[in-house]
Image (spheres, rainbow, N blue to C red):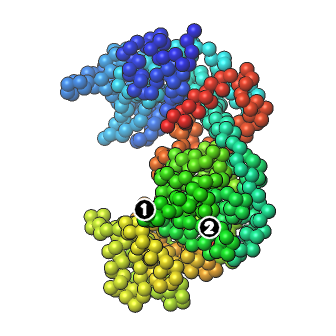
Amino acid sequence: MLTFDTDIRYLKGVGEKRALVLGRLGIDTIGALLYYFPRDYADFSHIQQIFDCMDGERVCVKGKIVTDISEHKIRKNMTLYRFKITDGTGYLNITIFNNKYLAAKLNVGSTYVFSGKIEQGYNTFNMSSPEIREENDTGLHPIYPLTKGVTQANLQKLVLTAIKSVDITEDVLPFSVRKNYKLTDFSEAIYNVHFPKSKEVLEAAKRRFVFEELFILRTCLCLMKGKKKKSAPKIDFSSLGCFFSLLPFSLTSAQQKVINECRRDMESGKSMNRLVEGDVGSGKTAVAAALMFCAAKSGYQSALMAPTEILAEQHYNFFNSLFCNSNINVCLLTGAVTPAKKRKIKEKLGIGEIDILIGTHAIITEDTAFSNIALVITDEQHRFGVAQRGALSNKGEGVHTLVMSATPIPRTMGLIIYGDLDISILDEYPKGRGSIKTYIIGSDKRERAFGFIKKLINEGRQGYIVCPMVEENEQSGLASAEEYYEKLLKCDFKNYKVGLLHGKMKAAKKDEIMADFKNKKIDLLVCTTVIEVGIDVPNAAVLMIENAERFGLSQLHQLRGRIGRGKHESYCILVSDSKGAKERLEVIRSTRDGFTIADCDLKMRGPGDFLGNRQHGLPELKIADLYADGDAMRMASMAAAALLETDPKLKSDECAALRRRVIDLYKSFTEN
Ligand code: ADP
Ligand code: MG
């Protein structure tokens, strides 16, 4: 008996040659063929009259061939076959390309069903390369993505052979799951997804396979999460009250809730693996500080990693001022630190003289050895790859890991990317924040916007202007930060203190500029997206973004998060002349809710593009669509959790097939 894992070569009707062709479609096993689902279905059940056809429409018509089938050799390797059909309401010209075999099979005077796209010519209707069926052969027909050397008919036949030659009664979805979620059995669904008798059974089959894909994924991630829990130091939180008294503000209830969730993990003796998801400005740093304080008071070291030097510096300043009177040693390690100083820092780390280390990637890429690290926190997690997340927690066996992310990702997606973590949500802003008004303007209104910014500066506020690039770029016509800065200095803002900040500057220069901005020595900061994450200057109340259409929605949301951090009313001005970007920018204007924005972003861009690249570790989903199948994702998650509750190791017979698939998937995660 053949199985799902059998090489496709051994399927009846497939030899070496065809196996190669199928390989190009990604079909290497019989299982892969069964899961090679149609991209669409030709619907031969709704016959339309030719009279009613419209240009560009995909239709199905039934007609008699009323002319001879003429052959036209238009060039080497290209022969057309043409004929006319009628259904009594009108005529349709049919063209077939290169398919001599098909043309020879058709009989003049006989009636067939033709499915394809209508093209209107001068006084005629045409249809090219239609799917053609016998008169009575109606219903849904699969359309597979093809490659040279294989036809729809070939694939249909092979799929049918495959279904007949393997055991399709074993189901990856345990019976209880199928029953609870009313899912079609595999044996039925696999037939119906390829050869549906009706739209209803097709929908049911698709629903099952979407569920199946998400269910296997979630089961795998849940198991990975369980595996991660190792024994880790117990942290004593009795000094938490002491930490509260150091803070210049009182925590929001959301912050307290999240700290408590972490506390439960860190007191347990098992390692914490948690994500704190909180929108820009929700106060994640204070949560990190609380945990690091308690770790230090319990005699352990901790590390905080930020994606940029500017941000690391900012965190360092905050922690330093917070802990200056509490004999906790805070230290900064970034790429900008001189080699001699680095050595010194590492020495001190090794003998436990440093309690809290703050830094950039440098912390993990270099051979930094801690003496007794118990807690590792990554800020702005989405900026780091999954690999780095792993590397940092390898710094110590069984350390507590916390990752913080400001870019809310759609919940469904979070369940996958962070599926191996517990999640805490900071869903509240500190009180007393001013609101943010967002405007979209054309570049013709820029002068007026400058006037408005000056007025705010005169009132004592500060502001940012974000440009896409550093150097002059004439061809693209984009405003570059450098050029822009020069211009503002000379003309519009010559009586104001304007600064320039971009990623290509030396670290020391960046620090200096940031410090000047914080200390109000700079009123208006012209910058690139270096300020995108984390920067916290509560007095900044206006943010203008040039060529706003160039930025992604989540990026715009992050940038806007730089203002509205103090008690003042704040203003975000998006400058764009692009008509195409209107809809996207409107999303930003209409809401400040990061989750809503992330959802729109996902919907507009699709999951592949959503986080910029694939380093986020999101596996490619074949069938499920994260946006459209959000409900299925939630159900599959519940089902996976419930199943693992009763059968944590998938040992029961009904889980046998599932177990195999989960192991395969797990391997694919750990191999990359
Ligand atoms: P993010 O979640 O974006 O990292 P931060 O931690 O930078 O936010 O906090 C944003 C600002 O809010 C900072 O100036 C911080 O000091 C302040 N802040 C944080 N928590 C509170 C609070 N509970 N009450 C008042 N201000 C707070
Ligand atoms: Mg932050």
| Residue that badge 2 annotates | 329
Task: Quote the CA–CA distance across marks 2 and 1.
Answer: 20 Å
Ligand 2 positioned in quadrant: bottom right
**One can see residue 466 in this view:** yes
Marker count (numbered): 2
Relative placement, left or right, of 291 versus 544 is: right
Against 432, residue 636 (above or below) is above
Kind of residue sitting beneath label 2: Asn
Residue type at mark 1: give it. Pro
Q: Position of residue 573 (x, y in %)?
A: 49, 74
Q: Which residue is mark 1?
A: 339
Q: Residue at x 64, y 74 (%)?
A: 324
Image position, residue 277 (x, y; %): 64, 57
Q: Tell me which residue sits at (31%, 18%) in the image.
A: 100
- Label 1: element kind: helix
Q: Is residue 632 above or below residue 60?
A: below
Instruction: Reply above or below: 310 against 651.
Output: below
Q: Is residue 52 above or below residue 294?
A: above
- Residue 489: image location, x then y, percent: 35, 84
Given residues 663 and 610, the one toward you in this image is 663
Is the CB atom of the residue marked by disc 2 within 8 angstroms of ligand 1's nearest atom?
Answer: no
Rendered image: mark on residue 521: none
Residue 477 lies in what quarter of the image?
Answer: bottom left
- The residue that appears at 48% across and 45% down in the rendered structure is 614
Q: In terms of sequence position, does the residue under pointer 2 or pointer 1 come before the other?
A: 2
